């Protein structure tokens, strides 16, 4: 577990998170940010939870933002490459917990972990231009726009 200031912890997903994961992974309103195209089954998520996925081997790490014993969000490192020392980062806070500054604290904590423990040199995020909250979040943490991926995310009949 990694402490998130006075808020809570970032921790590995647990079996007890299964119902919560079913809820967030099957929330179609956020599928566009992850390119999800089909619902997850309880079976699929249970398999995910029981596999031990090594970050170096699989290039991905999901941590749960836990506040007072409850999962409220998830933050992922993806496309991690120890050779090039870069990784992508994505974050999701459950709708009812947004607007409290928790995503900023979780992102700050993940940045510290990536830079100081994993020795990542470049941390990046793919943020759709329609996601104002995420754009503001990443800009507030010093991320800057270095390019625009045109016709990259197809969502509800158009590119966003």
Image: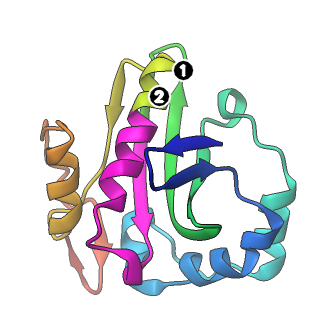
Query: Label for residue 142?
Result: none
Residue with the mark numbered 1: 117
Q: Quadrant of residue 59?
A: top right
Q: Quadrant of the C terminus?
A: bottom left
Label 1 secondary element? loop
Up the image or down, 134 lies above or below 54; here it is below
The stretch drawn in magenta includes residue 128: no
The residue sitting at 47% across, 19% down in the picture is: 116
Q: What colouring style does the render use?
A: rainbow
**Element marked by disc 2:** helix
Residue at x 45%, y 66% (from the top left corner): 35
Q: Residue at x 74, y 35 (%)?
A: 54
The residue singled out by tag 2 in the image is: 114
Q: Is residue 91 left or right of residue 72?
A: left
Toward the viewer: 106 or 69?
69
Q: Of all residues shown, which one is farthest toward the front? A: 6
């Amino acid at each position: 577990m990694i402490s998130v200031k006075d808020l809570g912890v970032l921790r590995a997903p647990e079996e007890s998170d299964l119902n919560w994961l079913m809820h967030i992974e099957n929330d179609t309103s956020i599928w566009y940010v992850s390119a999800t195209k089909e619902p997850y089954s309880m079976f699929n998520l249970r398999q995910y939870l029981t596999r031990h996925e090594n970050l170096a081997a699989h290039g991905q790490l999901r941590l749960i933002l836990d506040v007072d014993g409850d999962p409220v969000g998830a933050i992922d490192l993806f496309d991690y490459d120890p050779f090039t020392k870069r990784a992508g980062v994505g974050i999701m806070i459950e709708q009812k917990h947004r607007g409290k500054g928790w995503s900023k604290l979780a992102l700050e904590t993940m940045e510290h972990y990536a830079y100081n423990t994993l020795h990542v040199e470049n941390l990046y995020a793919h943020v759709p231009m329609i996601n104002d909250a995420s754009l503001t979040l990443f800009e507030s943490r010093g991320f800057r726009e270095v390019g625009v991926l045109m016709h990259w995310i197809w969502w509800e009949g158009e590119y966003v």
